[in-house]
Image (cartoon, helix red, strand yellow):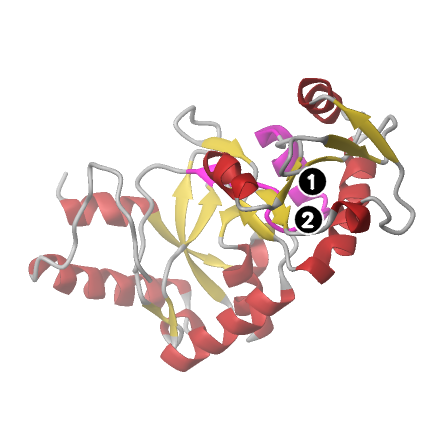
Amino acid sequence: MSMLEEILSKLEIRETQSLYDHEQVITKSLIKLKEGMLNIGQLVDPLIVDKKTGVVLDGNHRLNVLKIIECPLAACQVVDYQSPEIKVGTWYPTVKIAKENLLKLDSVRYEKVDEKTGKEAVENLRAPLMAILPEGECYLFNPGKYKIKEMIEEQRYLLGLLEQYTPSYLPLEEIDSRKKEGYSVFYRRAYTKEEIIKLALEHSPLPPKSTRHLIPWRIIRLNMKLGWLNTNKETAYNEMKSMLEKRAYNWNVRKYYEPVIVIY
């Protein structure tokens, strides 16, 4: 299979309204992305979509922009979500906040715990979040017994309280270095693939940045023109194919077999 054939085998044009987002969006990020997409007139990266259910695994902000501008079609990279090659984790909120301010957030109960006990509580739905302070102290937020949807609502409320401190979301690999910089890290349970699909199909999106999907062989920089996505599925696909044929012919397509760092 040639590189072009491999790329085309992963891409589909789908109706925007047939796709399900699984996370809420961050308003500032949505506005910024909308401005960027309209300025360049392109959907830069395809949405990554579960082939079977139509749930968007990566690209929830892009999907919402397409809906806002009433674009009927979306360029999608379809994947088998149940493949063991696709991993799912979460992003961890981090904020720089004084301990005294952290421990007086509105309507929050706290329980001081050791890190291992706290993580077990969060993983077993006995607390929505655990704060890990820079000096190592750990506090469960609103401990109790939760069902999935109850935990989602509680997380949404707690993360809303932290918005005034402008949280950033980091992968597990960067948590230790962020704590050394004086930031508190909020540990939360990662959702399973089954939970993510079920909630998305029920139109019950998770809080922003709840999931971190590790998907091999992502297609980036597709640069699909929005004008093509305002035609019909056949025309849009043919335009995309023609564009990729030209780029492949000019050796403007490269597949990396090693980890890379992308500078936007």
Q: Residues within 10 Å of mark 2 (few under 14, many from 20)?
A: some
Q: Residue at x 73, y 18 (%)?
A: 117
Q: In the image, is residue 199 part of the stretch drawn in magenta?
A: yes
* Real-space Cα separation, disc 1 to disc 2, in angstroms: 12 Å
Is 83 left, or right, of 136 in this rendering? left
Q: Is residue 188 visible?
A: yes
Is 195 left, or right, of 41 in this rendering? right
Which residue is the site of mark 2? 207
The x, y position of residue 31, in whole percent, is 57, 73
Q: Are marks 1 and 2 in contact (CB under 8 Å)?
A: no
Q: In the image, is residue 105 part of the stretch drawn in magenta?
A: no
- For badge 2, the amino acid type reads Pro
- For badge 1, the amino acid type reads Leu
* Residue 94 marker: none
Q: Nearer the viewer, residue 21 or 121?
A: 121
* Residue 199 marker: 1
> Counting residues from the N terminus, which is met first, the one under dot 1 or under dot 2?
1
Q: Nearer the viewer, residue 5 or 84?
A: 84
Q: Residue at x 68, y 46 (%)?
A: 206
For label 2, the SS is loop
Is 243 left, or right, of 210 in this rendering? left
The x, y position of residue 119, in whole percent, is 68, 23
Q: Which residues are magenta?
A: 192-214
For label 1, the SS is helix
